[in-house]
Image: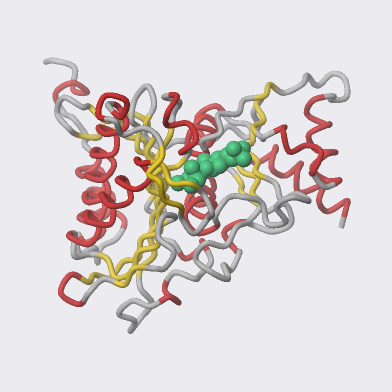
């Protein structure tokens, strides 16, 4: 008998379908089909990212987005890939993308019962130098009786039914939750399938790494300054943490999910709400981290309890190992 892991491949679609049948008796299969559309988007983006330099897909698109960022060519094409994949799935009523100023309300003949908020290409500043980037998504179900309106997406992250990210680095790994734990699937490019490689991911309760852009240190508030000082100049016998910062949220969060530690994008005197967007960066990552036994906060409040005011609202975020994040919260309480 050969090694079953080699001859009994658990693909993402199969695993999600089994999870739905096992945990959600009333499952219609719609979420599984929606996640298949998202997988297609990730496979297509992974393929384009790999050969970007070969097909003149690096560099700027000579356009800007609502964030005031200069869009990269891959930002634009990744966005179009996901919008088309989601619309043609017939499972989506509302889409929110980092790259589109307004929410997209899907026309009746293609409309479904889910709302997808997504960052088609996260870490764009790292594209041209080949450093890991990714895609982030979160999924809500439309509210009872709704056919898709803005109130279906302007809701706390605690109402999301699924979330995930895909890394485009040395390999492409999709990490996802449907509310019953977190699993990781690695793309086998030869057969075009995401294969279960990281079942039931659990974040260590404490880590040895901190991730923050130290270049903003002079703008940090007192709680932040004191927290980072405590991990860099700890009391004996504690040892200092190691600094790790990629500058792509997906890459920094993926390392934190697997190794433990803390990822932070604080608010500061320059950016009073921080930089990361609540709907399609903070909420999906906070959902995943909590499902893996970790914690995610704004510093003062559970991240998933935040009520976003608009689709591109931003928030400070600290996420990762439970004990590490609790230490940040203690510093913010002390400064309250
Ligand atoms: P995006 O490329 O989708 O606009 O997101 C970039 C974000 C996030 O990926 C990362 O954590 C953060 O920007 C890095 O910001 P700094 O360069 O200011 O550290
Ligand atoms: Mn991003
Ligand atoms: Mn982006
Ligand atoms: Mn961007």
On the image, the x and y values in percent for residue 163 come to 41, 52
From the viewer's perspective, is residue 271 above or below residue 141?
above
From the viewer's perspective, is residue 169 above or below residue 107?
above
Which residue does the image show at 67% across and 34% down from the upper left? 213
Which residue does the image show at 84% across and 25% down from the upper left? 234
Is 331 in front, or is 104?
A: 104
Which residue does the image show at 78% across and 51% down from the upper left? 269
Which residue does the image show at 60% across and 29% down from the upper left? 245
Q: Is residue 209 visible in this depiction of the protein?
A: yes
Report the quarter where the N terminus lies.
Answer: top left
* Left or right, residue 165 beside residue 214: left
* Left or right, residue 90 beside residue 79: left
Is 93 in front, or is 241?
A: 93
- The image's colour scheme reads secondary structure
Query: Which of the 4 image quarters holds residue 208?
Result: top right
On the image, the x and y values in percent for residue 303 come to 61, 56
On the image, the x and y values in percent for residue 118 come to 40, 54
From the viewer's perspective, is residue 252 above or below residue 81?
above
Q: Outermost residue toward the front? A: 62
Q: Is residue 292 visible in this depiction of the protein?
A: no
Is 83 in front, or is 279?
A: 83
On the image, the x and y values in percent for residue 31 come to 26, 58
């Amino acid at each position: 008998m050969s090694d079953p892991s080699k001859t009994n491949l658990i693909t993402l679609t199969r695993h999600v379908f089994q999870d739905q049948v096992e945990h959600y008796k009333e499952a219609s299969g719609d979420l599984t089909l929606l996640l298949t559309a998202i997988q297609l988007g990730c496979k297509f983006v992974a393929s384009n990212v790999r050969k970007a330099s070969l097909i003149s897909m690096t560099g700027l698109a000579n356009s800007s987005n609502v964030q005031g960022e200069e869009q990269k060519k891959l930002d634009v094409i990744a966005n179009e890939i996901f919008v088309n994949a989601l619309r043609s799935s017939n499972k989506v009523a509302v889409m929110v993308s980092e790259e589109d100023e307004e929410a997209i309300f899907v026309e009746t003949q293609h409309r479904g019962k889910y709302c997808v908020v997504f960052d088609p290409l996260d870490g764009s500043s790292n594209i041209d130098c080949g450093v890991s980037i990714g895609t982030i998504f979160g999924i809500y179900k439309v509210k009872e009786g709704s056919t898709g309106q803005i109130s279906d997406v302007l809701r706390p992250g605690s109402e999301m039914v699924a979330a995930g990210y895909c890394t485009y680095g040395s390999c492409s790994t999709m990490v996802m939750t449907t509310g019953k734990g977190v699993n990781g699937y690695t793309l086998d490019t030869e057969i075009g399938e995401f294969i279960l490689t990281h079942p039931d991911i659990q974040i260590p309760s404490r880590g040895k790494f901190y991730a923050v852009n130290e270049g903003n240190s002079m703008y940090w508030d007192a709680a932040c300054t004191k927290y980072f000082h405590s991990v860099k100049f700890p009391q004996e016998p504690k040892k200092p943490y190691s600094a790790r910062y990629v500058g792509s949220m997906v890459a920094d969060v993926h390392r934190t999910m697997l190794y433990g530690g803390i990822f932070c994008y604080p608010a500061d005197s320059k950016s009073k709400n921080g930089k990361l967007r609540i709907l399609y960066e903070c909420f999906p990552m906070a959902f995943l981290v909590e499902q893996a036994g970790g914690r995610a906060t704004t510093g003062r409040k559970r991240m998933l309890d935040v009520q976003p005011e608009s689709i591109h609202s931003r928030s400070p975020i600290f996420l990762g190992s439970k004990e590490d994040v609790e230490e940040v919260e203690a510093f913010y309480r002390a400064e309250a």
